[in-house]
Image: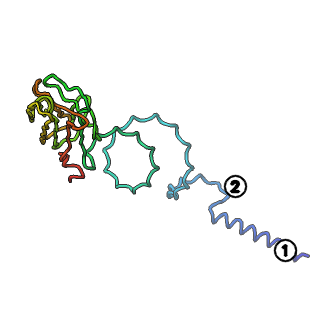
Amino acid sequence: MTSLKLLSLFHSLLVLQVHFSDQLDDNKIPPSLCTGHPGIPGSPGVHGSPGQPGRDGRDGRDAAPGEKGHKGDRGDPGETGVRGLMGDRGDPGQKGERGQPGECAVAPKSAFSAKLSDGHTLPLTVGDAVHFDQIMFNEQGDYNPETGRFVCKVPGVYYFAVHATVYRASLQFDLMKNGHTVASYFQFYGNWPKPASLSGGSLLHLVPGDQVWVQMAMGEYNGLYSSTKTDSTFTGFLVYSDWKNSAVFA
């Protein structure tokens, strides 16, 4: 029993010695054991390592808008882009105005033939046109039996012919173009028992609007006659056209 107490006492002393030995080594002597004056302050310590980054601060308030800057220089043109897809078909446009009449694509035509009807009253005044009133052919309508005049529509060269039956008086008539005599014809009648005849013709160059007709040249020479047995006729037709640019004449 005595040995155990001694062993316990020895252990306590050993622990106490170790405790005081650690305090002396660390210069941590309890104040109760120190009776001297405080020592001189030590030298500043070495700068420590940088600390950890701080947290982000709060967002600041919005500032007032700044003044508008000057317009910058124009940039260089960019490269041509890829061609886009074809768009939808648009609506039909409005109908255009009618174009000018073009030249004919087929050979132009112009022809007529007319005669005096039986018992037709002839003009007695010099300068009056003879009205060959009975139409035999006038497909294009270029001859007007009411005026006795042919009106040109197709430019070109025409041939006109007049065949007259002369009876009861001598006959003189003129072939007229736009009021000018282009040819004159005369047949004397000698009081014969049967009629005589007078024929003539001429080539004329015409442009659209030109007019051609037959008129009496002298009042006393008006023996133009027509019956069931004999006729007096006025005929004209186009020989060739001046429409050289037409597809027919190219």
Residue under the image location 9 percent in, 36 percent down: 183
Q: Quadrant of the N terminus?
A: bottom right
Which percent across, then down, holds residue 23? 67, 63
**The one of 151 and 93 positioned closer to us in this rendering:** 151
View extreme (front): residue: 193
Residue at mark 2: 32
Tag 1's secondary structure? helix
**The one of 35 and 191 positioned closer to us in this rendering:** 191
**Mark earlier in primary sequence (2, 1):** 1
- Neighbours of disc 1 within 10 Å: few (<14), some (14-19), many (20+): few
**The one of 15 and 124 positioned closer to us in this rendering:** 124
Between the residue at mark 2 and the residue at mark 1, the CA separation in whole angstroms equals: 30 Å
Tag 2's secondary structure? helix
Q: How is the image coloured?
A: rainbow
**What numbered label is drawn on residue 6?**
1
Residue under the image location 12 percent in, 41 percent down: 202
View extreme (top): residue: 125
Quarter of the image where one finds residue 128: top left
Which percent across, then down, holds residue 43? 50, 56
